[in-house]
Image: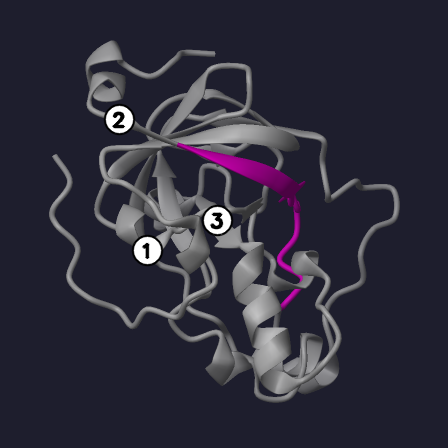
Amino acid sequence: MSGPPPDALAELEHSTPVDVLHLLVSPVHRYFGRPKDGPLPVDEATSEDREIADVVAGRGIVGDRFFGKAAHLDAAVTLLAVEALEAVAAQLAVPAFDPLLARRNVVLRGAELEPLRGRVFAIDCGDGPVLLAGRRQAAPCAWMDRQLAPGAHAALRGRGGLRCEPLSSGRLRRGPALLLSDVPLDPARAGSAVLPRGGRPLP
């Protein structure tokens, strides 16, 4: 797998320790149709929460439902801070949510994601950095009121995650990792809701 260009990595002077908690690689879109009808069942023969996930530049995560889909190439990898789900559960006074229900590919702990929108950054899980471009917020959908708790759809607004374009090929794996960026990140703000704003253009 091709690694990121050295010149791109040279600008990522800030390193934030994070934990990769989950890697959701799903061949099907389970939240299809009307929420009241419920999600499509999980194929028990298919492991969705992977130990590793292979990323291909310009295409996405191998085996995922959005891999190579033209309409999703600039959003083929989705990230979520688990602190966002914890903050929503606390706000709604309900038990903790299963992070996989949010249907984001990469669930992280300790990652402030909003400053990465409109920027190039990388995640290094020990197999070399995977370069990503943060394109736009991942807006929550109406399914969250059914799958998480009533009110979760509104509570997740501004903290539903980040949609990214993969700029280099590489491997992500569960466990400790480094989030490399050209701006400092504050892990204490990982669960904060931030309403959309204009990000700076990517090169």
- Front residue of 91 and 42: 91
Image vertical order of residue 175 relative to residue 146, above or below: above
Q: Which residue is mark 2?
A: 12
Residue 57 on image: x %, y %: 39, 26
Is 104 drawn above or below residue 180 in the view shown? below
Q: Nearer the viewer, mark 2 or mark 3?
A: 2
SS label for mark 3: strand
Please name whichever residue, 30 or 140, is drawn nearer the observer in this view of the structure.
140
User: Where residue 114 is drawn, which disc sits there?
Assistant: 1
| Alpha-carbon span between mark 3 and mark 1 | 11 Å
Q: Quadrant of residue 82?
A: bottom right
Q: At 55% from the left edge and 71% from the top edge, which residue is drawn?
A: 87
Label 3: which residue?
79
Identify which residue, 166 or 110, lies in the foreground: 110
Q: Nearer the viewer, residue 22 or 61?
A: 22
Which label sits in the foreground, 3 or 1?
A: 1
| Label 2 vs 3, first from the N-terminus | 2
Q: Is residue 200 left or right of residue 90?
A: left
The vertical placement of 202 against 177, above or below, is below
Query: On residue 70, which mark appears?
Result: none
Label 3 vs 1, first from the N-terminus = 3
First to last magenta residue range: 16-31
Quadrant housing the C terminus:
top left
Tell me the kind of residue under disc 3.
Answer: Leu
Say above or below: 8 vs 36.
above
Mark 2 to mark 1: distance in Å? Answer: 16 Å
Quadrant in the rendering for residue 131:
top left
